[in-house]
Amino acid sequence: MSSPSTAVDGANAVEVRGLSKVFNAGRPDAVEALVDVDLVIRPGEFVSLIGPSGCGKSTQLRLIANLTEPTTGQVLVNGKPAKAARLDQDYGMAFQLAGLFEWRTVTKNVELPLELKRWDKAKRRSRALEMLELVKLSEFAGHFPWQLSGGMQQRVAIARALAAHPPLLLMDEPFGALDEMTREHMQTELLRICGETSTTVVFVTHSIPEAVFLSTRVVVMSPRPGRITDVIDVQLGSERSVDTRETEAFFAKVTEVREALRGFQPTDVEPDIEQVAEEL
Amino acid sequence: MRRSPRRLFGLVWPPIVFGVAFLALWELAVKVFDFQPYFLPAPTAIWDAFTTNTELIWEATKVSGLNALVGLVLGAFVGVGTSFLLARFRLLNDLMTPLAIGLNAVPIFVLVSVFNNMYPVTSEVPRRLMVAVIVYFIVLVNVARGLRDVEAVHLELMRSYAAGDATVLRKVRVPNAVPYLFTALKIAAPASVITAFVSEYFGGSQNGLGSRIASNIALSNNAEAWAYVLGACLLGLAFFLSAVALEGVLTPGGVGARERDRA
């Protein structure tokens, strides 16, 4: 049950080879979600997957998490097949919905993954409180989720995802439902937390500034069938703050990612003649 | 989370004012239009009948109340038990749901006549069975839904924790079903009282609230009949409030607390 969740020495955090996913394969309503994707993520990286809706970025994350099985190709997490990594709980996961259990207090929510790993009660409690301190919610330890704001709930979800100190954190648009101010605050917090815990992160988003601010690399994906069309290195340094968002380097990277995405305008929309004329 | 006395007062006075005004109007109507007692007795007359017959009403209340309680507990336990099977086996669910709907569509009280034929005339068992059947379906349908309708994100999360079906049941499905159980009990508790005394109309011992209401009406003792109705109201209310109190005690921070906080 309790196999060590340490990484295989020198292994990549995530290794994806020739990955394809077809939903409803062999049926008239078959959908090619992902075609021939290769991606290697090294320990300590923060990699964002960005692309228009339906580009298979969430599917790719779910394949890494072994929440769904690939049609072809291979996924290695921590040097192990994805399923083995899931069974060893080598990663923590956070979704767009915080997904807290409303019958559990904040502390009890954070304790859940540890409970399933059969940690003893005292150890569980002290780790949960430690995680709540990390996300700055110590004073809400005894509250129930419905007594917290959306941003606070999302921070609890992050604390829960990191409670077992997994080497890898998988996040599927975790800040998608938050307002812009909360969102920027959460991004700074996430960077701080991942810095302190040296966690590798794979982060799905469709916000360009979010991807640029957070990532060491931004992976740009095309609409269905999803392929990786571009990988952009972002080096904004480890000390990113509010001011980083106003630097030339930040704007340059945002522009670079935007241009990489520009090829994918929805083709079924007729160009608005008047607007084109205005732009000219 | 505790409500301030001021807020509690704000919550309580409208129904009290309404109730008092309603009774006053009733009393006034009886006086002004000089209604005959067999048509509609005045609230004061009903209260007189209630206070003079307290002993008898209490005896009848104990009979009907015990029948309702036994049926409620039995129906709830069997209902919860079966709901696990329903949530686990899709086919069983598909078989049971139409049955539950069908039984709700017919006047299910007639079943009590069938039960009456199975047991001695003075047996209370048929009425308790009748209550149990009514409660059973209310609990079954609700709890099965609570076990089944869990959030997709919770299931994905549990899968990411490598949790098996038994763990998901224990950590997600059962706690998710608890508010559904209390919703069911809050419906089933007053329903069990109603069922208990309506069942008395179909024969058996003439010792409960239902049979007393019927026999007093037959004798044109309308104020007495209404006094027994008042007893029945109080019994139903007591059952409902017990269900609410049980929820408050067993789920101190749960959905119920949130609803109470919003109220």
Image (cartoon, coloured by chain):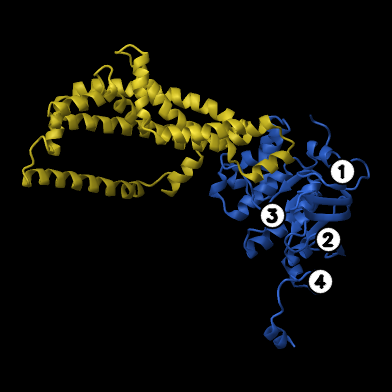
Chain colours: A blue, B yellow
Give the alpha-carbon distance from disc 4 to disc 2, as whole Å. 15 Å
Residue at point 67%, 59% (across, down): A176
The picture quadrant where one finds residue B121 is: top left
Side (left or right) of A130 relative to A228: left
Give the alpha-carbon distance from disc 4 to disc 3, as whole Å. 26 Å
The kind of residue tagged 1 is Asn
The kind of residue tagged 3 is Pro
Earlier residue among tags 4 and 2 = 2
User: Are labels 4 and 2 on one chain?
Assistant: yes
Mark 4, Cα crowd under 10 Å, few <14 / some 14-19 / many 20+, is few
Residue under label 3, please give it: A174
User: Are labels 2 and 3 on one chain?
Assistant: yes
Disc number lying in front (2 or 3): 2
Question: Which label belongs to residue A219?
Answer: 2
Secondary element type, mark 1: loop
The kind of residue tagged 2 is Val
Residue at point 50%, 37% (across, down): B180
Residue at point 78%, 39% (across, down): A89
Give the alpha-carbon distance from disc 1 to disc 4, as whole Å. 34 Å
User: Are labels 1 and 3 on one chain?
Assistant: yes
Q: Position of residue B212 (x, y in %)?
A: 21, 24
Question: Which label belongs to residue A263?
Answer: 4
Earlier residue among tags 2 and 1 = 1
Residue under label 1, please give it: A78
The kind of residue tagged 4 is Gly
